[in-house]
Image (cartoon, rainbow, N blue to C red):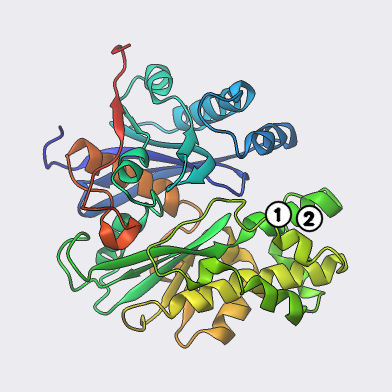
């Protein structure tokens, strides 16, 4: 266990959008953010992305050797490029997520990474939460609580991450701890960038609809949007979570549309899912701060601005880095794990009680 002194922790994140690996240094005691440090990004090559995409849906014990080699190699490259870390938070690559069925699978080997980096590595963040009946996701909310304190928020705010899947954290910064009743509500809102990425990959061989340029040329098909909103997920009360491919039928809903209309409709699906989710917030947030790749999509952001009753801004508006927030989150959570502090609670994952996830791998311990 670490003491309460600040630690320089290096977090890494490879999301379900399969774009690459983010790494970011943060100084924290696991409760407060003291400072942010260096960061780096390594995009996956087309070949690496294809290998990872082929492994999606695989569970422990299935053949994921090629994907594991990509995950370990790319993470090692990125993390070795940042000096000064005393601890590493390694999320791994989510391949499958079925918390009330087969569990959750984040591909990665924390022990091998600790040997390669020569510092302790915290990994396997989600399994303990799932074992106690939780959704295992989202896990960034405890960090979002610290971010709300860091920006000196005085009223409830919401952090919206638009990655492969969308997730929302409602924060009341007037509370003293994230696990305190009424401090947080968090849940996945629905699909975000992943199905749009899959659409443009399938039709155009692109990795994403960069800057929303394709969607901007299209018209939203209301009938497809209405069918999308009939999914049972939207009637489920939060906390709740999704697998990347839970809404794979979205592609079928836009199958007959031209490329631009399909992209516009899927972008509207992601934005409307957020609007529906906002109805669950305990009170209206004073602002929605958007992180993840979706904040760079002007079409997505405009839809949210029009559809929500509060300001919608990228997290850069309050001095945060939307490209690195998730990586910073896992550095922060690594320190919490090392200090024996909880990383999730009933209002963030529906876990039975506040729990600290994660295993700690130390160099030379194998």
- Picture residue at 43% right of the left edge, 33% below the top: 82
- Picture residue at 31% right of the left edge, 36% below the top: 358
- Determine which quarter of the picture holds residue 42: top right
- Which element is circle 2 on? helix
Q: Going by the image, does 120 lie left or right of 322?
A: left
- Picture residue at 50% right of the left edge, 28% below the top: 60
Quadrant occupied by the N terminus: top left
Residue 20: x and y in percent read 59, 41
Using the rendered image of the protein, determine whether residue 189 is visible from the camera's viewpoint: yes
Q: Going by the image, does 184 lie left or right of 100?
A: left
Near mark 2 (Cα within 10 A), the count class, few <14, some 14-19 or many ≥20, is: some
- Which element is circle 1 on? helix
Quadrant occupied by the C terminus: top left
Q: Measured along the vertical axis of the image, is residue 276 above or below residue 205?
A: below
For the residue pair 59 and 302, the one nearer the viewer reads as: 59
- Picture residue at 41% right of the left edge, 63% below the top: 187
For the residue pair 353 and 182, the one nearer the viewer reads as: 353
Using the rendered image of the protein, determine whether residue 144 is visible from the camera's viewpoint: no
Residue 120: x and y in percent read 30, 26
Residue 111: x and y in percent read 38, 20
Q: Residue lying furthest left in this view?
A: 3
Question: Can you identify the residue that label 1 sits on?
Answer: 197
For the residue pair 96 and 289, the one nearer the viewer reads as: 96
Query: How far apart are the alpha carbons under marks 1 and 2?
Result: 5 Å
Q: Measured along the vertical axis of the image, is residue 243 above or below residue 149?
A: above
Q: Measured along the vertical axis of the image, is residue 201 above or below residue 5?
A: below
Near mark 1 (Cα within 10 A), the count class, few <14, some 14-19 or many ≥20, is: many
Tags 1 and 2 touching, CB below 8 Å: yes
Query: Looking at the rendered structure, which numbered label has been put on residue 200?
Result: 2
Q: Going by the image, does 171 lie left or right of 315?
A: left
């Amino acid at each position: 266990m670490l003491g309460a002194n600040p630690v320089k922790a290096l977090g890494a994140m490879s999301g379900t959008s399969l774009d690459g690996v983010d790494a970011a240094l943060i100084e924290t005691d696991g409760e407060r953010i003291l400072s942010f440090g260096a960061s780096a990004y390594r995009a996956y090559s087309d070949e690496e992305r294809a290998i990872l995409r082929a492994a999606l849906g695989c569970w422990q014990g299935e053949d994921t050797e090629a994907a594991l080699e990509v995950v370990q190699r790319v993470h090692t490259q990125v993390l070795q490029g940042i000096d000064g870390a005393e601890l590493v938070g390694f999320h791994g690559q989510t391949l499958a997520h079925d918390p009330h069925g087969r569990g959750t699978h984040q591909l990665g080997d924390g022990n091998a990474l600790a040997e390669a980096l020569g510092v302790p590595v915290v990994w396997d963040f989600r399994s303990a939460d799932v074992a106690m009946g939780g959704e295992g996701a989202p896990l960034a909310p405890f960090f979002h609580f610290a971010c709300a304190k860091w920006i000196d928020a005085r009223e409830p705010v919401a952090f919206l991450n638009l990655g492969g899947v969308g997730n929302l954290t409602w924060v009341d910064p007037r509370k003293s701890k994230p696990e305190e009743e009424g401090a947080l509500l968090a849940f996945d809102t629905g699909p975000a960038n992943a199905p749009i990425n899959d659409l443009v990959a399938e039709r155009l061989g692109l990795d994403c609809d960069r800057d929303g340029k394709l969607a901007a040329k299209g018209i939203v098909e209301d009938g497809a949007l209405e069918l999308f909103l009939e999914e049972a997920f939207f009637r489920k009360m939060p906390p709740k979570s999704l697998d990347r491919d839970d809404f794979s039928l979205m592609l079928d809903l836009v199958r007959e549309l031209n490329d631009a209309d399909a992209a516009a409709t899927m972008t509207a699906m992601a934005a409307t899912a957020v609007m529906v989710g906002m109805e669950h917030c305990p009170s209206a947030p004073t602002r929605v701060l958007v992180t993840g790749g979706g904040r760079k999509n002007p079409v997505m952001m405009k839809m949210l601005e029009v559809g929500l009753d509060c300001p919608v801004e990228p997290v850069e508006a309050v001095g945060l880095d939307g490209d690195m927030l998730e990586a910073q989150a896992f550095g922060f959570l690594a320190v919490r794990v090392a200090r024996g502090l909880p990383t999730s609670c009933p209002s963030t994952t529906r876990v039975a009680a506040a729990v600290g996830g994660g295993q700690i791998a130390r160099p030379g311990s194998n």
